[in-house]
Structure formats: C-alpha cells, structure tokens
Image (spheres, rainbow, N blue to C red):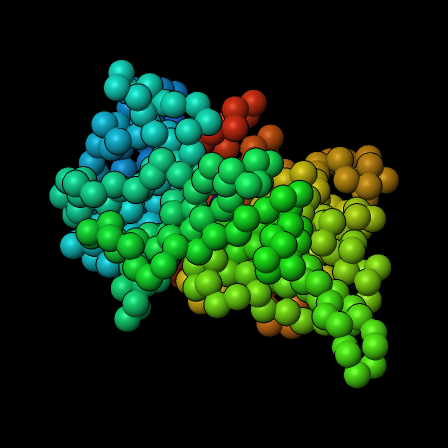
Amino acid sequence: MRTLGLLVVATLALAPSAHAGKEPAALDGVTEIARLVPEEGMIELAVADDGAGQLAYVVADAASRAEVRVVEVATGKEVRRFDISAFTTQPERLWFVGTGAKASVFVVGKPLDAAGEVIPDAGQVGALFDAAGKPAKKRFGPADAVVLVTGPKGKPAVAVRKTLPAPKKLPGAVVVQVERLDLKTARRIGKAKKLTLVDDRDDKLKFRVNHWSHDGLVAIGTRDGSYDQKEDVRTPDREGRYDLLDGKGVEVQPIADPMAHARRFQLLAKEGGRPLFARIADDLTGIELWRDDHGAALTLDQRFELYDPKSLTWAAGDDGTVWIGLAVDPWNRPAVERKKQDPEYFDVFRVGADGRATRVGRVLAPKKRFALGVTAGHLWLLERNVGFSRGGKALTIYKPAS
C-alpha cells in the first residue's frame, strides 16, 4: 500500500537556451500517456497508486459530489469508478489496499452532517471501499487524524489519533491518544498510547514535545537529562522521539551542538514535522531535502537561478527515490541580462543517492503550477487551480525516456 505526496546550497552550471530563434518544444524527455480532465468539477489532491500499475484519484465539485476513479498508469484507461459522496465530499487522502482489479481503496476525508454538509473543524473520518465501490460498515473517526498503517504480520491497519478531555487533576492539559485498529473489524490492536501534555511537556516521561511527525503519530522533542550520582552532575538533555503507534517509550540520542539543534527544531516545527520534504534554503540560493528530521543539500544539474522558488514541489516513488519539480522563471536573471525571456517549462528532476538532482524531463506550461507524483515508472502532474487551495483542472500521466 502506498500513497503519493504531492514532496546546503545547490551548485549549478548554466546551459544555453536550446530554443533561441525557434518555438520551444511542448515536451522534452517525457512522453504524454494520458490527460485526464473531468467533465465537470475538479480533481482533488488525494491521489494514490498501488505500486503495480493502477492510479486512483478523486473528481469532486465544491460541496456535494465526489467519486473515486481508477486508471491504468501505462495507458490512462479508466478501469472503475465509484461514488463516495455519502461518506465525504471533501476527500483528503487515498490508499490502495491490495493490487490489481480486486484492490480496495481506503478513503480519508472530512465528515458530513445529516444533511450531507461538511462539518467544519471536525477532523477526519476513514472508510474502506471494496473493488466494486461498496463501503465497509466499519468506519473510523471522527478524529484528529486517520491513517492507514501496517499492523501485525504486515497486514493493513488503521491508526486513529484523538485529543481527549483533560483529566480533572490537570485541567489545562492536552491528552493525545493514538490507537491501532483492525481495518476490517475496527477492533483495537494492543493498548492505546497517550501523552499528557502541560505546556507541551509530559512530566511522567520527562519529555517536552517540539513537533509532531508521521501524521501526528510520532512526537519529537527533548528528554530531560538524568542525575549522575557518581559524578554529582546532571547529564545534558537529549533529543527524544516517542512513537505512539508502537508505544515503546521515548528513544533518545545525544545533542552534539545545542545551537544547531535549536535551529533545526525551529525549522522542523515550522514545516509541520513532515518525514520528507524539500524546501528552498534560507539564503534563497538552492534546495534542501529533509528526511526524518535531517536536511542535506541538493545539487541540480541546472542553474538554480533559472527557476521560480515558489514553484517547488516534490514526491517520493515506490522505491523511495525522490523527485523534484520546478518551474522556469521566464524573466530569470540570465534572461533579463540577454533581454529575452525563457520558455516557461516545468522541469522534473530525479534525486540520486549522491544528492545530485538530474533533470529527466520538462513540460511547456506557461503560468501553471503543479502537484507532482511518481508511480510504476511514470510521472503524473496535477495542474493546480489558481486562487483555490483545493484540487486541480487536469491530471496528466507521462513516461520518462530514462
């Protein structure tokens, strides 16, 4: 089961324009397989693949209808669709459960009231839809987060994160609970795990939370140092990680550089604790790739100043390979210097194990912005709506030449 994301300074060399004096090519390095445009409504950002050649996406209107459509990645041919409007009209994530024609789809979205309206600020709900589009009787949530995870013996399960009422003895506390439930029966697997936080600190665990990662299932912060009776000193605080899904306690590691650690924690809290993300470096001269709370420079094989930093997007493939998307700024500095604008390409890069990002394809896309995904040896680009945070106009599947 896989889901796609829509995701230290670069040192680069400027390549001369390959299109001086002629019309730029619409595509370079990629072949368009299919362009999926809904008859009406929009395509939501919830897109998933089964790792074996199927892609699922959602077509919805602004409030009353949503349906899941499944296509073959290699051809773009639609193989099935089903209505989820009675469950949610604002889906946020999809996961395949299984592969092929018999695969089910787990849908997470905003809950509805009795009139079919989205309930504001009510968290998430999740439900499993079988291959025919029939929803299971057991549903999950509402909760802060509903996430498909791995259960015992590698079987799919559901993690549900909730904020519980504060205990009477700690009226100002925030109690965060995570429980793992069986996907089919919704029965709890193991014990629910909790953190009871007052000002972001669990006194029992001597652990202060800085940010949450992995959909709010993992708390990252600092663990109090301990008293060394032999040396009569208090040991330094350590970085702590508490996975509420497995509940094995706070794992710790030493903090070698307190100032660097504080800067890193500030950045991670700002970025929302995502386990994987790309960002523009603070000095605006390159890109950083962050995995599991640690960042490293990316070296592009193109000059970074050619691109619009606000266009940055990323995705991780089924094999863990990271892909980066950037749009060419038509009036970048070299273009201004030669008094001729560059074609507005959207360039896609594949990041190697050495941290080098190699351009593998480009799509001519003036004044467009995209979400990027990869699956089964293909790329997909979702053309985002302008001025609206939800969804996009069209989803296009491409095959890279290499």
Relative depth, front residue between 266 and 76:
266
Query: Residue at 57% of width from left, 65% of height from top?
Result: 250
Q: Quadrant of residue 339?
A: top right
Q: Is residue 38 visible?
A: no
Query: Residue at 17% of width from left, 47% of height from top?
Result: 130
Q: Whole-percent x and y of residue 180?
A: 35, 55
Please identify the residue farthest to the top as the structure is shown. Answer: 115
Relative depth, front residue between 300 and 149:
149
Looking at the picture, does residue 311 appear above or below residue 347? above
Looking at the picture, does residue 202 appear above or below residue 225? above
Q: Whole-percent x and y of residue 356?
A: 66, 66
Q: Whole-percent x and y of residue 275?
A: 56, 56
Q: Quadrant of residue 192?
A: bottom left
Query: Residue at 67% of width from left, 62% of height from top?
Result: 223
Query: Residue at 57% of width from left, 41% of height from top?
Result: 170
User: In the image, is 5 to the left or to the right of 256?
Assistant: left
The mark tally for this picture is 0
